[in-house]
Amino acid sequence: MPKILNKIHASFLENEIPFKDEEGKILLTAPESVAEGYFEVSFELSGLTGDEYVFMPACIYDGNRFRVKKVPYPPFFRVDEVSPGMDITITDVPRLNIDGTGVIEVTTGDLAVPCVGVYSQAQKKAVLIFFTQGIGMLSSAQPTNFGVAYKTGRVTVSYPHMRKESMYRHCLMTASTDKGIAFKQGDTVEIPYRIFEFDCADIHEFYNVFFVNRKCMGMDASDSSALPMDMMWKLNEDKFNTLNWHGREGYYGVGIDKSRYQCWLLGWTGGGISSFPLMKLGGELGWERAMSTLRFLFSTQLESGFFIGVVDNDGEWFSDHLPTDGSPTQDWHLMRKSADVLYFLFKHFAVIESKGEKVPPEFIAGTRKLADGFVKLWDKYGQLGQFVDVHTGDIAAGGTTSAGIAPAGLAHAWRYFGDERYIITAKAVAEQYYVRDLSKGYTTGGPGEIIQCPDSESAFGLLQSFVELYDLTREDKWLGYAKDSAANCSSWVMSYNYTFPSTCEFARLGMKTVGSVFANVQNKHSAPGICTLSGDSLYKLYRFTGDPLYLELIRDIARNIFQYMSRPDRPVYSWDTPPKRLEDGVICERVNTSDWEGFDCIGGVFYGSCWCETSSMLTIAELGDKHDIFGE
């Protein structure tokens, strides 16, 4: 059969020029002097129709060919836009049209790995084209990312990045402002690349080939240094016991900043999750406050079995969906949140029992009620949906992998209660997620403010489910599903250390990006850690299989987090004018390599606290004693 890659072209200001292809490097020479010029290298692909799976790590999944809702941030649905059987709907991100037409234009800063992949199901062939971040500097302040573009039959790399039609700015596409740079006649440019073209049976094989080769460009040489675990824990613990403790209501919530504003955000960003490591490692104070947090949690449980998702600093309850103006969506609940809590409740119970204590009966009853809520939902709809009415449990917005971790929680409910309904439902939901979602090359709907964009949070939640199902049942199918899931998850994790602008905060601090994790295709930044897990599923998968790739991946993720924590000897300052010092123990979610918030925000952080601190504590509690992760 003919190959997909047909020919390579080079141009300068859109005029074709000769080039040299030497050992994986394309050498280009400026034919004339210009004030604003740019080079392009185009890889021509043959036999494509527009139906192919198009992939750019952490940016493009199946071309992002979904129904689109164009709305400024924060996006939300109207009631008349949703139904249990709705099509996946995303925000206005870089994408192809549903029929495969159109063009995608981004930069390497938008990608977790500088790579474009195309899988042709019709030809049973695939190609992966890898690049580097870019070349040198435009100035002492600005690193040069390559531009990356795709339209059916052509992958183009530009230097400097040249988004000709449009660029992405925080939830909406807008007109591009990219410009060329000055070249003198005879100036040369080098674009490194590597191509893998292979027979490919399905999307899982495609991702497994990507996983094996995601570091093939050799850009990950430097590693995040492991910091003393006791020091990092102390900073985490002190921060949560000051900024995150809501004394009046009695819970560990989200601590925004030194104003001591605390609120309750169930699951997702930490509510009902952060209390687990604090219960395990936080001594008497952590124990008492974690138990109080669980009592508060169950006080917000409703008849459906699910929980109120948001409680503000004054104790007022809110919807997980953004409108709070009395519209019907004010009762919507994000299924990912209750799914997170179901899984983590059993982790709390294990700590309680390990200390020789009994789990309070009201905790047991509430947990069973929650598990029953998931079973009832599945039995009624044959899916878990994305948003449900928190009072009735009826699905409002359907589809997505939002509750990807729910099978893990249900599997543990089966082990704890001995009720076969829970494992039957767990297996059925997990099978649906594998066939309906993962086997199409994406998972969707984990975060609550991206509507239904592809995301890593549902992907890592689903990986946790497959690993827990294998661990508890020893059925080989789930191990195979876990391997496929881990390969997909790897696409969200940065494989190299980004070169930041020399004047930014992250350049000052020498931040490393290997192992930082993109959350979704809408919010174009990576972050310290998985939202909101330790990634122990990857470590378990390594122990089950012996495959060092899983150890390498979790090692990168786990060791990356702590360098982003503001601490007395190494404070982190915000991008405000004047800059504000982040409190000790605070970790901001922003690892901006993209210019989605503007060039000045690359390598900087806003002033505030984030879920990453919960991921940090989970990492210490679940992986901190693993020498093969944190040992030298």
Image: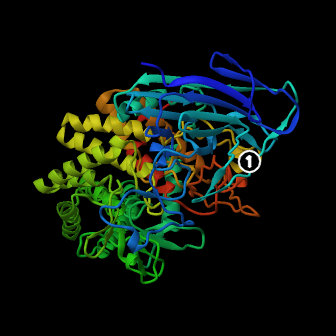
**Is 209 or 623 nearer to us in this picture?**
209
Residue 42 as seen in the image, left or right of residue 375: right
Residue 195 as seen in the image, left or right of residue 385: right
**Is 598 or 311 nearer to us in this picture?**
598
x, y percent for residue 402: 36, 57
Q: Quadrant of the N terminus?
A: top left
**Residue 59 visible in image:** yes
Q: Residue at x 58, y 68 (%)?
A: 257
User: Label 1 sits on what residue type?
Assistant: Asp
Q: Residue furthest top?
A: 23
- Residue 362 drawn above or below residue 134: below
Residue identified by numbered label 1: 178
Residue 75 as seen in the image, left or right of residue 409: right
**Is 298 or 44 nearer to us in this picture?**
44
Q: Residue at x 53, y 63 (%)?
A: 70
x, y percent for residue 429: 24, 52
Q: Residue furthest bottom?
A: 326
Mark 1 secondary-structure assignment:
loop
Tell me the crowding category of disc 1: few under 14, some 14 to 19, or many 20 or more residues within 10 angstroms, Cα based. Answer: some
* Quarter occupied by residue 540: top left
